[in-house]
């Protein structure tokens, strides 16, 4: 028997069941996901390199 939190004692679990087909074609994120991650990481580093020195200089 599964143990539940006392606040959830009257709640019954329900779920839906269905079959999902396999999509065997390449998607945009499948093809270019690595590039999106690298570009976003590069932009994040550039933003940090631009704005952190300005805060250090102007806070003095």
Image (cartoon, grey):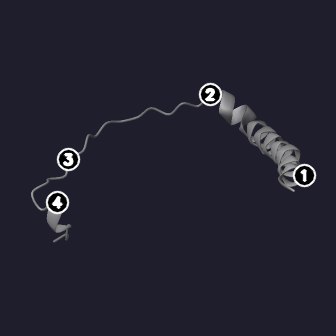
Select label 1 or label 4 by which is in front. 1
Residue extending farthest left: 10
Say which residue appears at 73% left-offset and 33% top-offset: 31
As drawn, the label of residue 19 is none
Which residue occupies the foreground of this view, 51 or 45?
51
State the residue position of label 2.
Answer: 25
- In the figure, residue 36 lies in which quadrant? top right
Could you give the CA–CA distance between mark 2 and mark 1, rounded to whole angstroms? 51 Å
Select label 2 or label 1 by which is in front. 1
For the residue labelled by badge 1, is the local secondary structure a helix, a strand or a loop? helix
Say which residue appears at 87% left-offset and 56% top-offset: 60
Instruction: Residue 7 in the image: state x and y as whole percent.
Output: 16, 62
Pointer 4 local density, CA inside 10 Å: few below 14, some 14–19, many at least 20: few
Say which residue appears at 80% left-offset and 38% top-offset: 39
As drawn, the label of residue 14 is 3
Upstream in sequence: badge 4 or badge 2: 4
As drawn, the label of residue 57 is 1
For the residue labelled by badge 3, is the local secondary structure a helix, a strand or a loop? loop
For the residue labelled by badge 2, is the local secondary structure a helix, a strand or a loop? loop
* Contact? badges 1 and 3 (CB < 8 Å): no
State the residue position of label 4.
Answer: 8
Could you give the CA–CA distance between mark 3 and mark 4, rounded to whole angstroms? 14 Å
Q: Is residue 53 above or below residue 2?
A: above
Which residue occupies the foreground of this view, 36 or 27?
36
Upstream in sequence: badge 2 or badge 3: 3
């Amino acid at each position: 028997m599964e143990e539940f939190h006392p606040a959830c004692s009257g709640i019954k679990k329900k779920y839906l069941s269905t079959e999902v087909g396999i999509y065997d074609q390449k998607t945009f994120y499948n093809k270019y996901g690595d590039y999106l991650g690298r570009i976003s990481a590069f932009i994040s580093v550039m933003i940090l390199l631009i704005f952190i020195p300005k805060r250090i200089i102007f806070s003095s």
